[in-house]
Amino acid sequence: MPADPEAEPEAEPQAFRQRRWEVPPGATDLLLVRHGASEAFVTGQLFPLVDGQGDPPLSADGVEQARLVCARLATAAIDAIYVSTLRRTAQTAEPLADALGFDVRVEPGLREVHLGEWEGGLFRKNVADGHPVSLRMSAEERWDVIPGAEPAAELSARVTATIERITAAHPGQRVAAFTHGGVIGEAVALASRSRPFAFLGAENASISRLVITPERWIVRGFNDTAHLDGGVW
């Protein structure tokens, strides 16, 4: 039959394209930056302690890593910079603070996991030596099998409270928090509700990204090292 000239044209079916993910309004975009490589521990020469925790400076490699990660972050529209009480985080953040003209904010809750009797560099040696306690620590995914180390519940509460303080101060902003591998591992594990040690091993000067809303923590990236020369998957 011929088409009816007075008939309504057939509507095009509605199409739904994939949308690019966006940070929710009012959320805090939190970049967790691990400090650059610190100086090696030499047997018999303990690192100086700050509040009972080892406080080595950056090594020459760590200084270069700091330069590279900060060069990348300098164009990332950062609104604030936080560091821990340990100097390797402040040294890593320094090029970014200088580039942006920002004062860094010291947040004690960003400090590394307290390693009890293995502080001052002994942790590195004992892990490298395959100490039985280090093997048990990895198997049980608990720091506090080390005598005097920070219990899991206390670490979780500390990291949670720290992130909540930072995000409450920066709604709708992007923050670079220069911190430590144990803290990054705990934060991403909390956000993803994973095993306690599932996200240990972030590389020095890597970037991990959480987006924090009042309702949930969203993992947007882990261990990004694209800015480092010789980075491997």
Image (cartoon, helix red, strand yellow):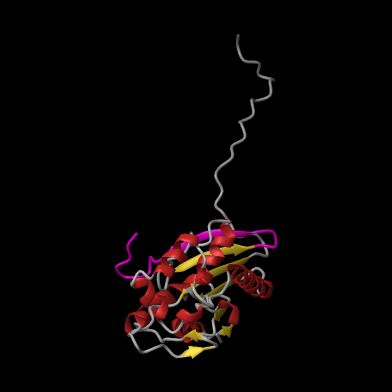
Q: Nearer the viewer, residue 98 or 190?
A: 190
Q: Is residue 232 left or right of residue 149?
A: left
Estimate the x, y position of residue 99 in percent, counting from the top left: 47, 83
Please name the predominant secondary structure of the magenta segment in the image: loop
Identity of the residue drawn at 59% across and 61% down: 190
Q: Is residue 17 left or right of residue 66?
A: right
Q: Is residue 6 left or right of residue 233?
A: right
Q: Which residues are magenta?
A: 213-233
* Residue that sits furthest to the left in the current view: 230
Q: Nearer the viewer, residue 117 or 200?
A: 117
The C terminus: image quadrant: bottom left
User: In this rendering, is residue 19 above or below 31?
Assistant: above
Where is residue 30, by image quadrant?
Answer: bottom right
Q: Is residue 131 magenta?
A: no
Where is residue 210, by image quadrant?
Answer: bottom right
Estimate the x, y position of residue 107 in percent, counting from the top left: 59, 81
Where is residue 13, by image quadrant?
Answer: top right
Q: Nearer the viewer, residue 170 or 205?
A: 205
* Residue that sits furthest to the top in the current view: 1
